[in-house]
Image (cartoon, grey):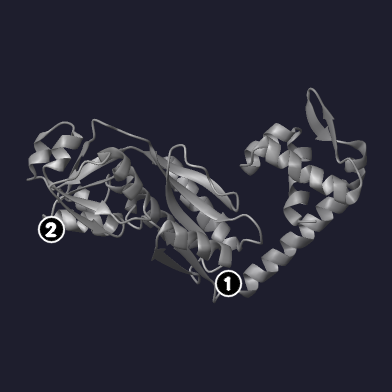
Amino acid sequence: MRVEQLEYIEAVTRLGSLRRAAEELHLSQPALSETVRNLERELGVDLLDRRRSGAKISDEGRELLPHIIGVIDAVDRLRRAADHQHQISRMIRLGTVNAATVPLLVPAVREFRAAHPMTQVEVVGAQQGEIHRSLLEGSFDLGLVNYLQGDDLPPDFQTTELLRGRAVVCMRPDSPLAARETVRVSDLLAEPLIVMRSGYVMHRFMHRLLAGRTPAFSYSTDGAEMGKLMVAEGLGATVLPDFSVVGDPLERSGTLVWRPLDEAGAAVLLVLQRRRSGSVPRAARDLHRLLVERAWSL
């Protein structure tokens, strides 16, 4: 028996339907239903009354509900006590493939620091595979990673979509590409191109976009931040999600500009992930909430 199974039953009871509970919990309805069935098999009791019109708490489940709520409350008190005990020394570690998403990350961290002045925040740039391993091992509390629209999402993580963007070409204002309203792939091939190394979503995006075509000259680098610095130094152009460029200090100062691609390709998603199993410290939950709120305001 897992605490989240009990929390699922509480959500179904409070919201009155399996569908609304699944929406609030960011789960698919079949996944929520199967988790509840596993608990029912373990307890030997039908907790939900399933009908064609929907699923609601059963009479047997309602009798057990005070015990379920009691367990949830006890676990919540334990979490609050642990949060208080570690308030001074606690460090939140956030892994990100895209540390340069300044309009999202910096305001959220600033607001978090105001609410948690004694809690340190460490932002660590890493590839997606490393972030996933560190989340599972517990060395990262949260992870900001990219996907392409249509990618399968790993089941071990709670995933919240923050931003959905299109790929754009990032360049200096004096680049010949800046004179165009949109940039074609053939235009890119004629210029030095800065691409992300294997392991980054934008490496996979460029592989699809170029479809075997080879640019005149290319560099490879780690992450959007270094890519933009290389562009600013006049080494070439790069292709990034628009949310990595718009509002960046280099873009605001006019050091960099961007133009849309005429072959848009798949949308690029920035998502926030945390480990699905195990307890989540209150500070990490607060930073998670602030990142979501900031993303929805952009």
Three-letter amino acid code of the residue under disc 2? Glu
The residue that mark 1 highlights is 87
Q: How many marks?
A: 2
Above or below, comparing residue 18 to residue 101 in the picture: above
Query: Sequence order check: which comes first, mark 2 or mark 1?
Result: 1
Name the mark on residue 24: none
Q: Quadrant of the N terminus?
A: bottom right
Q: Is residue 46 left or right of residue 279?
A: right
* Residue drawn at point x = 80 percent, y = 23 percent: 52
Q: Is residue 225 left or right of residue 115?
A: left
Label 2 – label 1 distance at C-alpha: 43 Å
Q: Position of residue 125 (x, y in %)?
A: 38, 63
Q: Is residue 79 left or right of residue 184?
A: right
Above or below, comparing residue 87 to residue 276 in the picture: below
Q: Position of residue 287 (x, y in %)?
A: 51, 57
Q: Is residue 44 left or right of residue 106?
A: right
The residue that mark 2 highlights is 233
State which quadrant residue 223 falls in.
Answer: bottom left
Three-letter amino acid code of the residue under disc 1? Gln
Q: Secondary structure at mark 2?
A: loop
**Contact between labelled residues 1 and 2, with CB atoms less than 8 Å apart:** no
Q: Residue furthest front?
A: 212
Q: Quadrant of the C terminus?
A: top left
Q: Residues within 10 Å of mark 1 (few under 14, many from 20)?
A: some
Q: Secondary structure at mark 1?
A: loop
Q: Residues within 10 Å of mark 2 (few under 14, many from 20)?
A: few
